[in-house]
Image: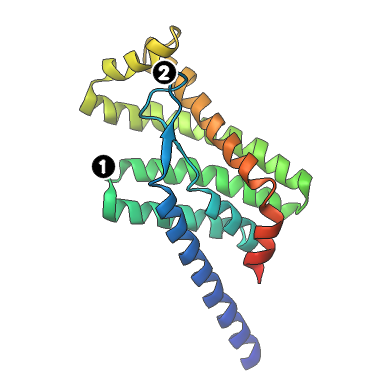
């Protein structure tokens, strides 16, 4: 590699790092804007769109860049405003990161509407599965120690009588919630991804 090529790679790397940093900061701010869906899910399950910057970043710069944006926004949350001692942030990285990585990988392989839609579907399935697993084994037991697991399950059973234990809460509350969240992010991304990906590639 000659000197000119090295300078070009260095400029590209610096440019990518700056974009990742900016998108991570935007994602971090968006984490504080969230809302529950009363009557459908318990109030502690709140929708947010903080993974949208990671999606656009991953589409423009590759799936690993998107995943890193998810990681950095959660590290910022861990440093400044965690209420779970890092457990929630790790779960968020795995759950949101799964969706972002799958979607952006699909788009990298096929940068057209079919690739995007495939990413939406497979990413949503991945997010639902990982979200269910993480909540069943990690998050719900953690919150159960703080609030009482029976109280949490009770919040679900008021909404859906099929909820009566940890497993049914996961199946009827957590999994559908993650499907709704992934679908919402997909619908927001769909009309914007071409413009945002082109903008971030400049």
Give residue 47's position: percent from left, percent from top.
46, 36
As displayed, is residue 134 above or below residue 197?
A: above
**Left or right of residue 163: residue 108:** right
Q: Residue at x 59, y 87 (%)?
A: 7
43 or 24: nearer the viewer: 43
**Left or right of residue 193: residue 17:** left
174 or 1: nearer the viewer: 174
Q: Characterize the local packing of mark 1: few (<14), some (14-19) or many (20 or more) Cα atoms within 10 angstroms.
A: few
Please name which of the two marks, 1 or 2, marks the residue nearer to the observer: 1
Q: Mark 1 and mark 2 in contact? Answer it, CB < 8 Å.
A: no
Give residue 79's position: percent from left, percent from top.
28, 55
Could you say which disc has been placed on residue 113 in the image? none
Give residue 94's position: percent from left, percent from top.
46, 43
Residue furthest top as drawn:
161
**Left or right of residue 194: residue 72:** left
Residue 140 is drawn in which quadrant? top left
SS class of the residue under badge 2? helix
As displayed, is residue 7 above or below residue 37?
A: below
Residue position marked by numbered label 1 in the rendering: 83
| Residue 45 in view in this figure | yes
Q: Characterize the local packing of mark 2: few (<14), some (14-19) or many (20 or more) Cα atoms within 10 angstroms.
A: many
Sequence-first disc among 1 and 2: 1
- Could you tell me which quadrant the C terminus lies in? bottom right
As displayed, is residue 25 above or below residue 117?
A: below
- Could you tell me which quadrant the N terminus lies in? bottom right
Disc 1 and disc 2: Cα gap in Å?
Answer: 22 Å
Residue position marked by numbered label 2 in the rendering: 169
**Left or right of residue 36: residue 6:** right
Residue 118 is drawn in which quadrant? top right
SS class of the residue under badge 1? loop
């Amino acid at each position: 590699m000659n000197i000119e090529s090295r300078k070009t790679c260095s400029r590209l790397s610096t440019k990518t790092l700056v974009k990742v940093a900016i998108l991570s900061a935007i994602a971090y701010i968006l984490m504080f804007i969230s809302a529950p869906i009363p009557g459908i899910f318990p109030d502690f399950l709140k929708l947010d769109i903080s993974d949208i910057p990671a999606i656009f970043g991953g589409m423009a710069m590759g799936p690993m860049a998107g995943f890193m944006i998810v990681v950095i926004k959660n590290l910022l949350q861990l440093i400044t405003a965690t209420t779970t001692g890092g457990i929630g942030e790790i779960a968020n990285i795995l759950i949101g990161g799964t969706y972002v990585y799958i979607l952006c990988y699909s788009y990298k392989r096929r940068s057209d509407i079919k690739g995007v839609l495939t990413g939406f579907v497979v990413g949503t399935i991945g997010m639902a599965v990982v979200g269910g697993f993480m909540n069943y084994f990690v998050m719900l037991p953690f919150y159960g120690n703080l609030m009482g697991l029976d109280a949490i399950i009770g919040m679900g059973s008021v909404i859906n009588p099929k909820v009566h234990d940890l497993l049914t809460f996961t199946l009827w509350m957590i999994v559908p919630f993650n499907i709704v969240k992934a679908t919402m992010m997909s619908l927001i991304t769909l009309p914007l991804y071409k413009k945002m990906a082109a903008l971030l590639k400049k």
